[in-house]
Image (tube, rainbow, N blue to C red):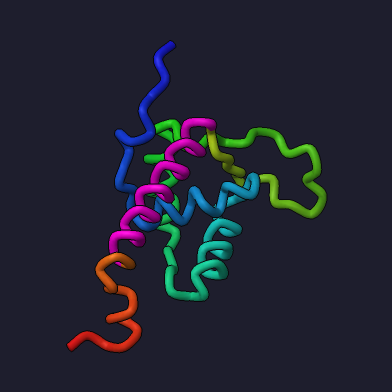
Amino acid sequence: MQRRDPLSMLPLTPAVLHILLALVDGERHGYSIMQEVVARSEGTMRMGPGTLYGSIKRMLADGLIEEAGERTDSKGDDERRRYYRLTDFGLRVVRAEVARLEQLVQVAHGKKMLWQLEGGLS
């Protein structure tokens, strides 16, 4: 079986990147993913259910995530909730995207772009 190249999926949309980052810590259901994204972005990134579940549908088809299946500890949890987790391929893709973005930030540092933004562009 040939391994897929994570670079073939890049660049990721902001929504997909945030969802993958939310799932790095473990399985989550949709509402929990939305809460994680808002918290980690300090409120600057919000996604509605349409964006979230549309992205999840595409990510499932692309093999980036999978449904987690039966919950072993479902006390107080709604049985209708679907939990999602990263696949090995999804983890490789998010790592590749973070490395790509890190390289861009290094270029921006080299051009003193981040300093210019802090001091204001003229």
Taking 45 as reference, is 117 above or below it?
A: below
- Residue drawn 65% across and 33% down? 69
Name the quadrant of the N terminus.
top left
Position in image of residue 56 (x %, y %) = 44, 45
Which quadrant, please, contains the C terminus? bottom left
Image quadrant in which you'd find residue 27: top right
48 or 103, nearer to the observer: 103
Count all numbered tags in the image, as a single digit: 0
Residue at image coords 45%, 44%: 94
What secondary structure predominates along the stretch shown in magenta?
A: helix
Relative image position of residue 85 (x, y in whole percent): 58, 40
Magenta residues span: 88-108
Q: Residue at x 79, y 54 (%)?
A: 76
**As drawn, is 41 to the left or to the right of 75?**
left
Q: Determine the image quadrant of residue 109.
A: bottom left
Please name the residue shown 39% across and 32% down the image. Answer: 61
Front residue of 5/12: it is 5
Q: Looking at the picture, how far across and down is residue 37, in whole percent?
A: 51, 63
Residue farthest to the top, as pictured: 1
Does the magenta segment cover residue 100? yes
Give 67 or 40, whichever is nearer the viewer. Answer: 40
Q: Is residue 77 left or right of residue 109?
A: right
Residue at the front extreme, as displayed = 110
Image x and y of residue 93, in percent: 43, 39
Q: Is residue 79 above or below residue 6?
A: below
